[in-house]
Amino acid sequence: QQPVQSPQAVILREGEDAVINCSSSKALYSVHWYRQKHGEAPVFLMILLKGGEQKGHEKISASFNEKKQQSSLYLTASQLSYSGTYFCGTRRSPASGGYQKVTFGTGTKLQVIP
Amino acid sequence: NAGVTQTPKFRVLKTGQSMTLLCAQDMNHEYMYWYRQDPGMGLRLIHYSVGEGTTAKGEVPDGYNVSRLKKQNFLLGLESAAPSQTSVYFCASSPSGLLNSPLHFGNGTRLTVT
């Protein structure tokens, strides 16, 4: 099953913050985050491996709660360049099998306006 | 630095025709994946391969076949195209055994079946 992302879409003004959530019904080993511009391939942002881990990438950071099987992507002081569709991808734990697969959520469309 | 290359970039087929999409990577990656992307549905895994000569089904394998005769190439075949297979197809690759490795995506193939 695909992980569930929320919200499906969000519009921000430059400088505003946003949070995108990703949750799974399966035990997770890792969570990937990607951004895709219109007509382009998804581009890797970050991977989170451990429960409770939080990583940052410029003004974009993320957390991973392994027990809740949830991850959140935080975009602070948004810029026009942040516009695009954000996808979370999940790998299940090796013990549960199928860990070679990365399963993506349905995406969150983010638009940053001046 | 070619990375992951998909051919063709665009294709129009008539219902019932067949075709093969080619994915080639020059990073010596073991794992390769085929996804399809449809509006509102994110990226859905069609088939994947964890090494030369191996393939496995993903979430939406029906109507597709794959082959991995050479490590660097992963072919996706449509034996009898249907309008429901109109989509954008992305190939991706990642190193083996490194579950914290991101996926590297090709630029996609836009397929229309009339």
Image (spheres, rainbow, N blue to C red):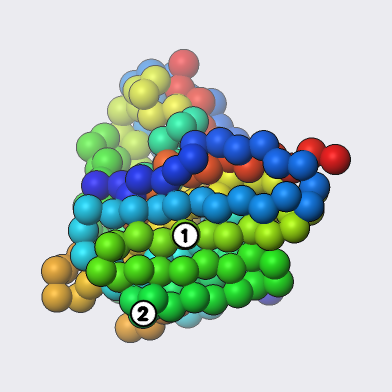
Mark 1 residue type: Ser
Q: Nearer the viewer, residue B113 or B89?
A: B89
Rendered-image quadrant of the N terminus of chain B: bottom right
Does label 1 or label 2 sit earlier along the sequence?
A: 2
Mark 2: few/some/many CA within 10 Å (<14, 14-19, 20+): some
Residue B50 visible, this angle: no
Q: Nearer the viewer, residue B83 or B53?
A: B83
- State which chain disc 1 sits on: A
Percent of width and height locating residue A98: 20, 65
Q: For the point 49% across and 37% down, which residue is it?
A: A8
Mark 1: few/some/many CA within 10 Å (<14, 14-19, 20+): many
> Do the residues under discs 1 and 2 have CB atoms within 8 angstroms?
no
Relative to B102, say whether B96 is above or below.
Answer: below
* Marks 1/2 same chain: yes
Q: Which mark is residue B44?
A: none
Q: For the point 49% across and 40% down, which residue is it?
A: A7
Q: For the point 58% across and 68% down, which residue is it?
A: A61
Q: For the point 77% across and 42% down, which residue is it?
A: A13
Q: Find disc 1 in the rendering and name its residue.
A: A72
Q: Secondary structure at mark 1?
A: strand
Mark 1 → mark 2, Cα distance in angstroms: 14 Å
Residue A78 visible, this angle: yes
Q: Secondary structure at mark 2?
A: loop
Tally the marks.
Answer: 2
Answer left or right for A37 relative to A73.
right
Answer left or right for B20 relative to B56.
right
Q: Quadrant of residue A30?
A: bottom left
- State which chain disc 2 sits on: A
Residue sticking out furthest to the bottom: B97
Q: Find disc 2 in the rendering and name its residue.
A: A50
Residue sticking out furthest to the right: A114
Mark 2 residue type: Lys
